[in-house]
Image (cartoon, rainbow, N blue to C red):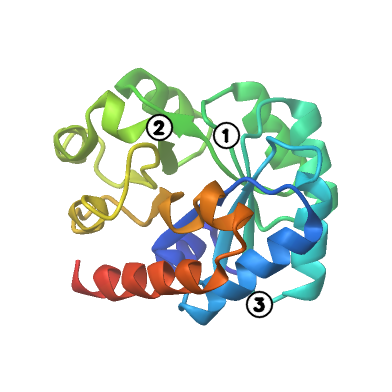
Amino acid sequence: MESLRQQLLKVRIMPVLIVQSEEEALSVCDALAAGGIHAVEITLRTAAALDAIRTVKRERPEFCVAAGTVRSVLDMEKVATAGVDFAVSPGFSPALSQAASELGLDFLPGVSTPSEIIQGSECGHQCFKLFPAEVVGGVPLLKALASPFSGVEFCPTGGIGPHNYRDYLALPNVLCIGGSWMVDPALIRAQNWARIEELSRECMSGAQLA
């Protein structure tokens, strides 16, 4: 079984997805896969999210599926039951960390300050989601964190798009990035799977150059 770090390093690009149905989730994942992306973070922002996670894990077992917007112990328990590969939170909480550990579930907590990184490290975490990345300092912040937090690695998310994702991926303390531009809700509503595939292919090509 791969560690959380290995999963993130393999992924490189993590599409952050809001879904309205199981069928929609499968269609998006098929378009992502056609473009070379085999990972997705399905956020707990709709009533369909948990069923979508279960369906993707069952029907597309090759996909790395993360559950995003995990904000409570109950959320953690639900996504563990749904069979996700790991859980992602927009912030850090010792209670969430403990719950994930007790459930045997990999957990990527969100941080935005050095103090939160220290708290997370004290709970055994070495991989974090930097969120909201662009708002809290982006690439300059990650460069500044590299020396005092040697060995700590990040998945920056928030404000990242085609104009800057390669700048993040070029940093040695960045394992992967999270973004939603390739799964824009407008594209999903229009069922423009071809455009999602095209954007995914562009993402992966750019990631190889970073």
Whether residue 75 sits left or right of residue 85 in the image: it is right
| Quarter-of-image position of residue 58 | bottom right
Residue type at tag 2: Phe
Q: Earlier in the sequence, mark 1 or mark 3?
A: 3
SS at mark 3? loop
Residue 49 image point, x, y percent? 75, 46
For the point 75% across and 27% down, which residue is it? 73
Marks 1 and 2 sit apart, C-alpha to C-alpha, by 9 Å
For the point 51% across and 26% down, which residue is it? 91
Q: What residue is pinned by disc 3?
A: 62
| Label 1 crowd bin: few (<14), some (14–19), many (20+), radius 10 Å | many
Residue 69 higher or lower than 62, as above or below: above
Q: What residue is pinned by disc 1?
A: 89
**How many discs mark residues in the rendered view?**
3
Residue 106 image point, x, y percent? 62, 49
Q: Earlier in the sequence, mark 2 or mark 3?
A: 3
Residue type at tag 3: Glu
Residue sitting nearer the eye, 202 or 151: 202
Marks 1 and 3 sit apart, C-alpha to C-alpha, by 23 Å
Residue sitting nearer the eye, 180 or 80: 180
For the point 53% across and 71% down, which residue is it? 32
Q: What residue is pinned by disc 2?
A: 131
Residue 41 image point, x, y percent? 58, 52
Residue type at tag 1: Ser
For the point 62% across and 35% down, which residue is it? 69
